[in-house]
Image (cartoon, rainbow, N blue to C red):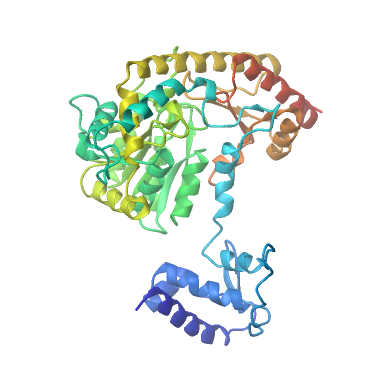
Amino acid sequence: MNERSSVTELADILRREVERYPEGRKLPSSRALVERHQVSPVTVSRAIAVLAAEGLVVSRPGAGVFRAAAFAPPVAPAAAPPPGRSGDLSWQEVALSADAGPRTPAAEPLLATLNVPSPGVIDLNGGYPHASLLPERLLAAALARAGRRPGAWDRPPVEGLTELRGWFARDIGGSGGPLDAGDVLITAGGQSALTIALRSLVAPGAPVLVESPTYPGTLAAARAAGLRVVPVPVDADGVRTDLLAAAFDATRARLFVCQPLFQNPTGAVLSAERRAEVLRIVRTAGAFVIEDDFARRLVHSDSPALPRPLAADDPDGVVVHLRSLTKAASPNLRVGALTARGPARQRLRATQVVDSFFVSRPLQEAALELVADPGWARHLRTLGAELRDRRTATVAALRRELPGLLGAFRPGGYHLWLRLPDGTDEAVLTAAALRAGVQLTPGRPYYAAEPPAPHLRLSYAGVDSPAHAAEGVHRLRRAYEEVVAG
């Protein structure tokens, strides 16, 4: 039976059932309908959408699907609109809301970080280094050489080019470490890797443990995969391992997502004691940990020696590691890697094949050319010095203009986490800051549940100079005085 006929048959069955319901009665959950009728979640979603479009049911995001207050048979469709004019698109609001829950709002924090500020607005919001900090000449040369490589335009292996996979294995696990090329899957950047991992390792409806606060892209990807997000608090030494163990016991979760290095948004680095404890807790739970190592190439020139990735100390395949070249190279070089061992890697590979087949070979060849160029190491040293200077200017400006907002920080990454006074309306403050000419990120989207206090995340990587970073803080002070102090 094909999908279309399954949707039609299920819609017919549900239509007969719902017409016997009193107005306002809730329908069984999507999961219950899947089990009762032995169909896929997609079939249930589409059948519900059919009834919603007919006006028989209404969807209330977060609450469920209910018998509509009144039902009238659908009218014949209107004639097609004249060329060049839009038709009535209001039906989409019903059809798109008939699914299991809201999806668009989860993407809004990500879209906000990708917004290009208006002219004259200082960007203390974005997640990518300013264009002046990127190795454009190296990239141009790498692309030119990649295009001339023998077989550069042939179809690549699904897993990625063996040479590139080997480079990532050594970069992550070290020479002679637990990883080899066979443990690596090349992905289209870090967000793609994260999405693949979340969709592969646990089933829809399962709990997934995340740091709190955490990167909104993690929350968005987990919810889009149908997972139940369970927050575990972070402090200055990283995730609270006592609470992590309690969360595994309470939820029986099989997956934990963390950023042990320069955590977004707090900047915390997981302490040596907690590194070992995280791995022990996860192994005991029979679970996986997704290690999002997004900021390793954004280390500042005055940072202490970095701890090894968790994956480098994991002989048992507990850690699924993800890393990307994108932030340190260019937003357009969307090349990353997922490392996993055993059946987990096969699951990841299958998910990626369904999603996108493989990553463009010329792009993989260009990444190889880039990391093999002696200029790559020089670029990373320059980037570390520039990020240090921007951080130094930003911290000095905060201590001068807004003392008390800045908590502990580590010299690495690209952001600072500012604690606002209790009762501060983050949205009002960020709107006032934008009017003052500086764009920042409110703290609320970084929490899976109610935040314990108001915050702002300030990113200094996207400004073109340390002076502009300091000027951005000065403009923030004007908005702060208007909203909070005033």
| Residue 241: % across, % down | 39, 36
For this rendering, which residue is in front, 468 or 286?
468
Q: Residue at point 47% right, 84% down?
A: 13
* Residue 184 in view (yes/no): yes
| Residue 321: % across, % down | 32, 37
| Residue 44: % across, % down | 46, 72
Q: Residue at point 20% right, 28% down?
A: 177
Residue 165 as seen in the image, left or right of residue 222? left
Q: Residue at point 71% right, 38% down?
A: 425
**Quarter of the figure with the C terminus:** top right
Q: In the picture, residue 65 is in which quadrant? A: bottom right
Q: Residue at point 39% right, 14% down?
A: 378
Q: In the picture, residue 324 is in which quadrant? A: top left
Q: In the picture, residue 121 is in which quadrant? A: top right
Against 474, residue 359 (above or below) is below
| Residue 387: % across, % down | 51, 18
For this rendering, which residue is in front, 309 or 15?
15
Residue 153 as seen in the image, left or right of residue 405? left
